[in-house]
Amino acid sequence: MVGVVGPPGIGKSRLVRELAAMARRRGVEVFTAFCESYTSQVPFHVVARLLRAAFGVESLDGQTARDQVRDRVSDADPEDLLLLDDLLSIADPNVPLPAIDPDARRRRLTALVNAASLAREAPAVYVVEDAHWIDEVSESMLADFLTVIPQTPSLMLLTYRPEYRGPLTQLTGAQTVALGPLSDSESAALITELLGPDPSTTQIAALVAERAAGNPFFAEEIVHELAERGVLQGQTGAYVSTADVSEAKVPATLQATIGARIDRLNPGAKRTLSAAAVIGSRFSRELLETLGIDPVLKDLVAAQLIDQVRFARQPDYVFHHPLIRAVAYESQLRSDRAELHLRLAAAIESGDPAAVEENAALIAEHLEAAGELHAAYGWHMRAGTWSAPRDIVAARLHWERAGQIADTSPFDGPDHTAMRIAPRTLLCGNSWRIHANISADRFNELRQLCGVTGDKVSLAIGTAGLVNEHLMRGRVREASLLAAECMALIESTGDPALVIGLSFLAILVKCETGEMTEVLRWSQRVIDLAEGDPIRGNIIIGSPLAVALSSRGLARWTQGAAGWRDDFDRALEIGRRTDPMSHAFAVNLIYSPAIPCGLLLPDDTALREIDEALHIAERSGDDMTLGSARMAMGLALIHRQSHTDREHGLKVLAELREMCLYERFNLAELAVLDVYATGKSARRGDHDDAVARIRRGVDDLFRSGQFAWCVLTTGVLVETLLSRNADGDLSEAETAIKRMAAIPFDNEYVARDILLLRLYAVLARARGDDGAYRDLVTRYRSMAASFGFEGHMKWAEAMP
């Protein structure tokens, strides 16, 4: 992997052309994609172009392209192939895409493309030019794809300007080639090659060298410009000059030089070049004609302003250099350029009706460039809708752009405020998925706009998103305080579907804080409104009912109430047959607290249920879905008897911890993961380090108000202290137990009470108080049996 970096005109594109020619002479295939300034906000643009080239489907019809892809990756999963078809824009419009969340889509596409790269035996060169203009989604996906390049007979070549500092410049193992100005001797050699040996060009050569200042493309363009003006006569490498050097005026900049050359074109060639610049770096005669242009292409090729790259019945052309396109674009009258953008948007929309939603982003960019802002807003919103199930970051980019247009454009009419609200609602409601911080200005803006219009629904959606953003970033107290306001706002909308669909976010917060009375009340409200319909209110998750049953079961058993087994059974059954997120959330709400807390055993039945949810989450779920299933699996495995299972569990928790650090899962769970992973690995020896880390984790949970986890992690701290049995450990263990006993729960909390009996019993035994120990164990066994807490029953029987 090589990055070629340098300012415009320094030779990046020339180096790529030379390298590509060398590769082809040796039978090595070269696949190229260009990044362009006007597509920097069009998601998937570059990655799709590069992969279309690599799979050889650029000029094929849909069915032929799909057949070719299947020949290349014949052993791939059929669902994965449908996802790849969609990314390559060759999908069969009559075949629906599989119901897969964006994060899982990304994981599966990465695995498929990387497997295809590893299976390829023939050497290849992949080129991405002008990466400083790459769209954010392509940039991120390419970073994933390129991880396997060092294991293949491939060269990945990226060119970019010095100001680019994106992730593609930070790939492990990549090399960087920085191109600087030519030295005086190198400039002289180049200019001599361009002009030829005739003595009449000697003074011209000195002038070119001085003005070009070591920039090779500038030198070439000056020579072209002088030849077109008649200062030089002849041809490249054999020029003569009869002009006085004082008359050989040279434009001051490279851009001015190119502009002067364009100005001298005949009207037809100039119109052709201008229209091509609006289309992009690569264009066809057919598309130019669609824009109402009578193409004059031979003159442009002869002038080395464009190059022909495909010689089929429908030839394709590219600009000889990106700067030529940039100058041709900028030198047009704004009104003329706007008209061309408008025609191009219409041509894209009508050219392929089946792909109109896929092309919504490109249409939006052209309409915006044409000044048709109201229409561009609508197309950005459509592009966001198309992108959301494919890549949520791509959707975010369009929602943000739509919001910027609505804010800065002088629209008239009653819908202006609604236009400003709509993208903000989507951004705030999905902030936890798009890793966007809305807790400051963006949410306040939404609140103010909704206040003007009385839009309670949009505000409720945005508030629910902010609740979850607080939780995702570990701000549990803030999330808890906002949860009650959020629930009241949701109820005020009078929309049962909204109450059902959004309540689970507030419920999850209260599960963390241990406010089980609220969990019970809000879960019951959702269950009542759902009226047995598993998918009613499926705004965010497929089955709010499944999650509400899980949380009601959790609240019931922690408070010692009956009915939790039936709730759990129904929740798992409904979640299993609806969607991956509902299933994983139900599994997590059930097993992640129930196994560590001693309600349920980590038996084979539980492991099968969790493993099924995890497998589905890996293939079809988003990161939150995957993280939820991993949490349940990790906590279950570390409570198994098998050393192999426990080691596997620690590995799963380590993977989940990394997800938290990269904000792909709930950061509030980081301390929980650290406590349990440290507690289970403490048996390997270093108790001093383990106690310090567990103590720190428990303190963090108390500070954040995550009292439900404070109960369980205090148990880990106490048992680790007693296992170490150093000076002061018994006293610290007793202090920890008392702090846990003083947690101000809003109702009876049986989950804490039974653990208190166990901890006081092991503390009494550590102190040698056999009488108190026997009494506490007897009470502990009785309480475990009376409530049917299977884990505690087993633990109690193991206590002598």
Image (cartoon, grey):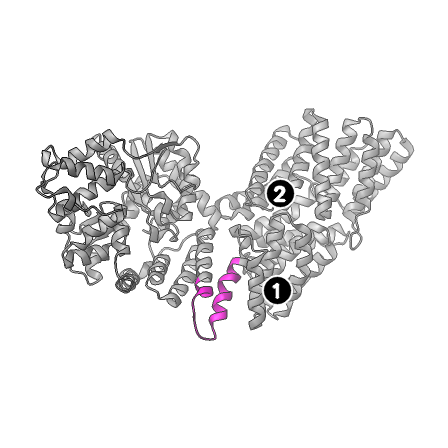
Q: Position of residue 294 (x, y in %)?
A: 15, 60
Q: Disc 1 marks which residue?
A: 499
Q: Position of residue 3 (x, y in %)?
A: 36, 35
Indicate whether 680 appears above or below 545. Answer: above
Indicate whether 629 appears above or below 355. Answer: above
Question: Which labelled disc corresponds to residue 340?
Answer: none
* Residue 623 seen from this side: yes
Work out whether residue 669 or residue 380 is closer to the camera in this orientation and state it. 380
Identified by mark 1, the residue type is: Val
Identified by mark 2, the residue type is: Ala
What residue lies at 81% left-to-right and 40% top-to-bottom? 737
Tag 1's secondary structure?
helix
Indicate whether 611 appears above or below 506. Answer: above
How many other residues sit within 10 Å of disc 2, few (<14), some (14-19) or many (≥20)?
many
Q: Position of residue 756 (x, y in %)?
A: 81, 42
What residue lies at 16% left-to-right and 44% top-to-bottom? 246
Residue 409 falls within the magenta-colored stretch: yes
Residue 298 falls within the magenta-colored stretch: no
Specify start and end residues of the magenta stretch as a single range: 405-427
Whole-angstrom CA distance, mark 2 to mark 1, is 27 Å
Q: Residue furthest right?
A: 771
Work out whether residue 434 or residue 114 is closer to the camera in this orientation and state it. 434
Q: Residue furthest top?
A: 685
Q: How many marks?
A: 2
Name the quadrant containing residue 131.
top left
Q: Is residue 610 left or right of residue 402?
A: right
The N terminus sits in image quarter = top left
Q: Disc 2 marks which residue?
A: 632
The kind of secondary structure the magenta stretch mainly shows is helix
Q: Which is more N-terminal, label 1 or label 2?
A: 1
Name the quadrant containing residue 779.
top right
